[in-house]
Amino acid sequence: MIGMIFIYLIFEARGCMVCHSEVRKEYSEGVHYKERIECISCHGGNENTLDIKKAHADGFKGIPGRRKVIKVCTYCHSSPEKMKPYGLSFDQEILYYTSEHGEAFKKGNDEVAVCTDCHGVHRILPHNDPLSLTNKMSLPLMCGKCHSDFNMMKKYGISSDVVLEYNLSIHAEEVRKGNPHSPTCVGCHSTHGAVPPGIGDIEKVCGKCHIRTREYFLRSYHSKVWKELDYLECEGCHSNHYVEKTSHDLWKQKCIECHERESKSYKIAEEIYTLFITCENEILRAEKLTEELRKIPVDVEDFIGRIEEAKTYLIEAEPVSHSISVEEVKSFIAKSKSIAEEVQREAIRKKKLFESKRILLPIFWFLIFFTIALIIYYRR
């Protein structure tokens, strides 16, 4: 029996795992094991012997130091022949050395992240695995291993609050809700080529998701002036990591930071703010009347559909507002407001009609019964 187990260990685990059984579980759960990438691919040596000296011959590398990890990983991950069958990119090493991490690594900084810091060592899982270190839900925690370390970040003049701020943001909230389009760290900073977006690049980064918003912003006076003044584009009003859910109050809160209350620019902000608030109020009135009718009950399906249409125009007006053009915003707001007001008029008419029927119906039945009574009386 013992002999059978021994033979099984040699066959299943090869020579490496007979001695290095402590990594068996981690390795066997990883993607490399599933794809039959053997120990010797990374560590070298001879896996077909139980003799330690022979096993540690044939180009044995042992445990790669931080300076060697990248070359070990990219031996495969920079090979088009090896990566193409999996549909994986093979430019990871090039990208890494264009990143802040890679630039610092080239200068001799061994503290910056290398492959194993982000992907793990033996238990390397694909990013779509919920248990993967690079899974979307895990990324803030994984990046936070370094970027939430106060002492480490202080040396580089980087805030250690970025992960905390992100976790409080609307982006993180949407990720937790399961929104596949909401970004994590890599959505804005990239993966292997990770860099902080610079002035002039932020609108490009945000514009990957907020496409129409970027289009209208680039047409605005802000776009031209902010580039000349080296302002931080989207970040200037919406922050970077702690991006809150947008509110029309931003027109009051942010514009005053740059523009005097009596200035023409601030008056434009006030007018755009008023357009949004007025339209929202009209939609709320339409919704309130519709709910009153529903409780009567009166069929309100048509009203609900039209209110949703009004809300759609209002939502479409939000990216348009980045053009800072009152007329462009007004063209969308007018459509939304018109639908909401029309729903209100029809809802009021239906309500009055129902109320009049409720009053007239008893009178109608009274007249019918009175007429019947008279007919019976005269026939007698």
Image (spheres, helix red, strand yellow):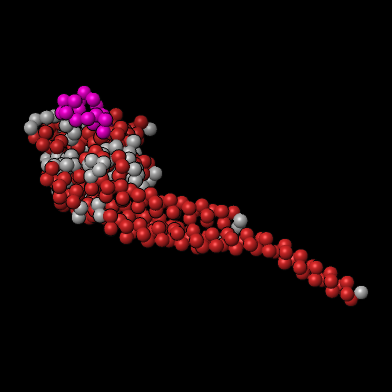
Residue that appears at 13% across and 29% down:
110
In the image, residue 81 above or below residue 33: below
Q: Is residue 122 magenta?
A: no
In the image, residue 24 above or below residue 224: above
Q: 363 and 203: which one is in front?
A: 363
Q: Main secondary structure of the magenta part?
A: helix
Where residue 28 appears, as percent x and y from the top left, is 31, 38
Q: 118 and 31: which one is in front?
A: 118
Q: Is residue 161 magenta?
A: yes
| Outermost residue, bottom side | 379
Where residue 58 appears, as percent x and y from the top left, is 12, 36
Q: Quadrant of residue 48?
A: top left
> For this view, does 242 lie left or right of residue 105?
right
| Outermost residue, front side | 262
What range is drawn magenta here?
Answer: 144-162
Residue that appears at 19% across and 25% down:
154
